[in-house]
Amino acid sequence: MNIESISRIEILDGGELILILESGGNASYQHIYREAAEVSWDKELKGFKSPKPRQWSYLEKYLHIVKVAENCSILLSLNPSTEFQNIPQNIKDEILASTNT
């Protein structure tokens, strides 16, 4: 299992949620689309991305990205220096609380 630290979580201008990796990831991460789970690798931003939520909350999208990555043998983890950009405080709090359960 590859362990990857999340350097930044961001809601992009289009509403997509992206988890940017501290390491910059690796080329094989582009194959995550094969899971057919609305998670893709953004090679420019170096993170896993999911479309703007239609029915799910941003917390559910975050947990979904983490689970899909885990299915591909990639363990995503927050660290004390993880940045939250364009993320409302209540969503940040939910994400942080989800990692403590």
Image (tube, rainbow, N blue to C red):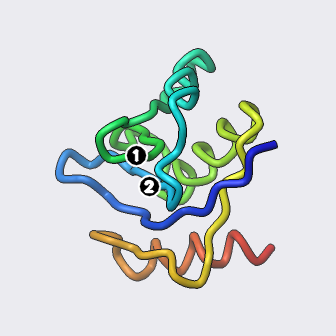
Can you say whether 5 is above or below 19 in the image? below
In the displayed structure, would residue 78 be above or below residue 13? Answer: below
Q: Do the residues labelled 2 and 1 touch (CB within 8 Å)?
A: yes
| For residue 25, above or below residue 37 | below
* Neighbours of disc 1 within 10 Å: few (<14), some (14-19), many (20+): many
Give percent across and percent down for residue 14. Answer: 20, 45
The secondary element bearing badge 1 is classed as: loop
Q: In the image, what residue occupies the spot 57% across and 70% down?
A: 95
- Taking depth in this image into account, of 52 and 83 the one nearest to the observer is 83
- Please report the residue visible at 27 percent of the width from the left and 69 percent of the height from the top: 86
Left or right of 91 on screen, residue 99: right
In the rendered structure, the answer to whether residue 6 lies left or right of residue 90 reads right
- Report the Cα–Cα distance between label 2 and label 1: 6 Å
Q: Mark number for residue 37?
A: none
In the rendered structure, which disc, 2 or 1, sits on the residue that comes first in sequence? 2
Residue 65 place in picture, x, y as percent: 58, 44
Residue 91's spot in the image, x, y percent?
Answer: 46, 72
- Of the 4 image quadrants, the one containing the C terminus is bottom right
* Left or right: residue 13 compared with residue 11: left
Q: Mark 2 points at which residue?
A: 20
Residue for point 54% across, 62% down: 6
Q: Which amino acid does label 2 sit on?
A: Ile
Q: Which residue is drawn at 66% across and 78% down?
A: 97
Which residue in the rendered view is the most extreme toward the left?
13
Residue 84: x and y in percent read 39, 73
Q: Which mark is residue 46?
A: 1
* Residue type at the position of mark 1: Lys
Label 2, residues with CA under 10 Å away: few <14, some 14-19, many ≥20: many
Give SS at disc 2. strand
Viewer-nearest residue: 68 or 3: 3
Residue 24 lies left or right of residue 34; in this view the side is left
Quadrant of image for the N terminus = top right
